Image (tube, rainbow, N blue to C red):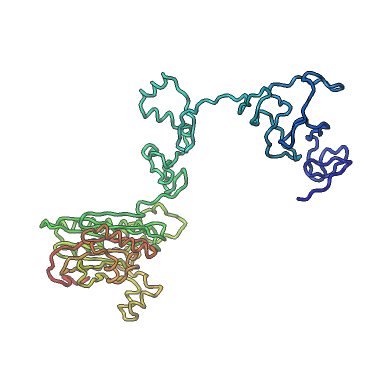
Amino acid sequence: MSQKPKSAQLPTCPSCEEPLESGDLFCGACGYDLSVVPPRPDDRPTLVMNGLGPAVPDTRAPDTPVAGAPVASAPAAGAPAAGVEWPTVSGTDSSGTPPPQLPEELPGLESSGSRLPAHPGDFELPAPSALIRDSSARDYAAPESTPAENTAQESAGPERAGSESAGPESTHGKATDPRTADPGAALPAGGKLCVACRAGRVDTDGYCENCGHAQPRERDHVEQELGAVAAVSDRGLRHHRNEDAFAVASAALPDGSPAVVAVVCDGVSSATRPDEASAAAAGAANESLLAALERGTHPQQSMHDAIVVAAEAVNALATAPGGRDHDPHRHQNAPACTIVGAVVASGLLVVGWVGDSRVYWVPDDRGGPPARLTEDDSWAAQMVAAGLMNEAEAYADARAHAITGWLGADAYELEPHTASFKPDRPGVVVVCTDGLWNYAEGADEMARALPADAARRPLHAAQVLVGHALDGGGHDNVTVAVLPFALPSQGAGSAYSST
C-alpha cells in the first residue's frame, strides 16, 4: 500500500501516517486514539539494537556522573547492561516499531554474565492428576484423595466407585452419551427406551420425549420361522407404516400327521386403519384353521371357514371405537384388507384367498414348470377373464390394481376362493402380497427370484424375496411366507374345484 510523505513541520498519525494538527485527540483519517501514543524520546539509544553495528565503547568510570546530567538511580536486578547484543524481536506494533520486551523474555546473558532463565519468576506446576472421562467425552481432573479415602473406595466396590466418578453432568440428570449409555440402567420406569438417544422415554405417539426421534414400529420388519414354514414382512421404502400382516403355525391332524399353515393379509390403504384390519384377519384365520384341522375337518373346508371368520373379525372393527389415529372430524370408512392362505397337510396343498394376494408353486428341481395357484380379485383380472384385454394390456392400465374383492364391512359380497392340489414332486409354496409379485409377476420370474435351496432354508428364501422387492424399488409393503412341500409324489392335478 502506498503511503503519503511525512510532513516536516507537523506530526503524523502513527497508524496511517496522516498529518495531524496541534491539539488533535483523534486522527481525522483513521480515527486512531492519539492519547494512547507516548511521546517519542529525543535521545538516541546507547545500545546497538538488533546487531546493526558495533557499540560505541564507554570510556567513563562506572561511578562517575556526567556533568550537567541527572544522576540515574542504580539499575534494577536483571536490567540490561551496555554493549549487550539482544536477538531480533519479531513483529511490530501499530507505530511500526518493535514491541517492547523484557530482557528475561529473550534468551541471552544477565549483566553478571550468567545465562537468563527461560521464564524467571515462574513456579513449578504440579504433575497432572488422573483424568476422568465422563459420558460427554470431556476430561476432568480427579481430586486427590487421602489414603483413608482410597481404602473406603476400595471397600465400597466398583459400583460405588463408578457412581462417584461419573462426572459433573451425571449429577444434574442430563442425557448421557448414547454410545456409552447402559440401556438397562437408563430404561425409564413404565415406558420404552429411545433407540436414538438411549435416554428418553418413548411417548404414546411413537416419538422420544428427550430427542424427538420417531421410533421404529414393531411391525416395520418382522421375521418368523417354525422349521417347516417361515415368513418375513417389511414396511418397504415408500410407506410410513407396515399395513401387511401374517401368521404361520403348525398343527397335528387326528391321525398324528403334521399340518403347516401360512396366512398373509394386505391392508387396503384407502380404508381406515388398514394395519389393524390385516392383523385382525391374519390372527382370526390362523386360529380358525388350527382348530378345524385338529378336529379333523378337511383342509379345504377349514380354509373356507377361516376366511369367513377373518371377514367377521374385520367387520367388527367398523363398529369398534377408533384406534390410536382416530380423528372424529375426519371421514371414516370401514377397515379392509385382502387375505391369502395355504395349508400343507396329508399330501395336499390347499389355498384360499380374497383379493389380489397370491400363491405360487415352484418345484425343487425346477424341472417342472412353476405355476400361479390363485386368480386376482382385481379390475385387470376381470378384463382378462372377459376377453376384453390380454394380460399385458390389462396390467399396464392405471386401474389394474383396483381390487374387486376384499374383507370389510363395506365389501360388496364375500366370496372366499379355495382350491386343493396334489403336486407330483417336492417343491416350495410362496404366499405373498402384491408388494412382492409386482417385482416378479409371472411364475417364471418368481422361480428365478427364489433361491435354489428354499426348501432347506425357508427363512433365508423369504429374506431373499423381500430383498428382491426392496431392490426393485420397495414401493409397497412386502410380505412373503415360504412353505416347503416335501411329500412324496402321488399324482398331479386339482383334487377339488375352486368354490
Vertically, is 410 above or below 76? Answer: below
Q: Is residue 263 above or below residue 491?
A: above
Taking the image as shown, residue 329 lies to the left or right of residue 6, namely left
Give the residue furthest to the bottom: 387
Q: How many marks?
A: 0
- x and y percent of residue 387 in the render? 31, 81
Depth check, front residue: 204 or 336: 204
Residue at screen point 36% across, 70% down: 401
The residue closer to the viewer here, 73 or 351, is 73
Query: Measured from the top left, where is residue 382 in percent x and y?
Result: 32, 75
Quarter of the C terminus within the rendering: bottom left
Foreground residue, 20 or 212?
Answer: 20
* Percent position of residue 156, x then y: 36, 24
Left or right: where 447 falls relative to 183: left
Q: Identify the residue at horizontal 49%, vertical 36% (top origin).
A: 138
Asked which quadrant contains residue 165, the reply is top left
Give the residue drawn at x 41%, y 73%: 398
Residue 113's image quarter? Answer: top right
Horizontal and vertical percent position of residue 465: 30, 62
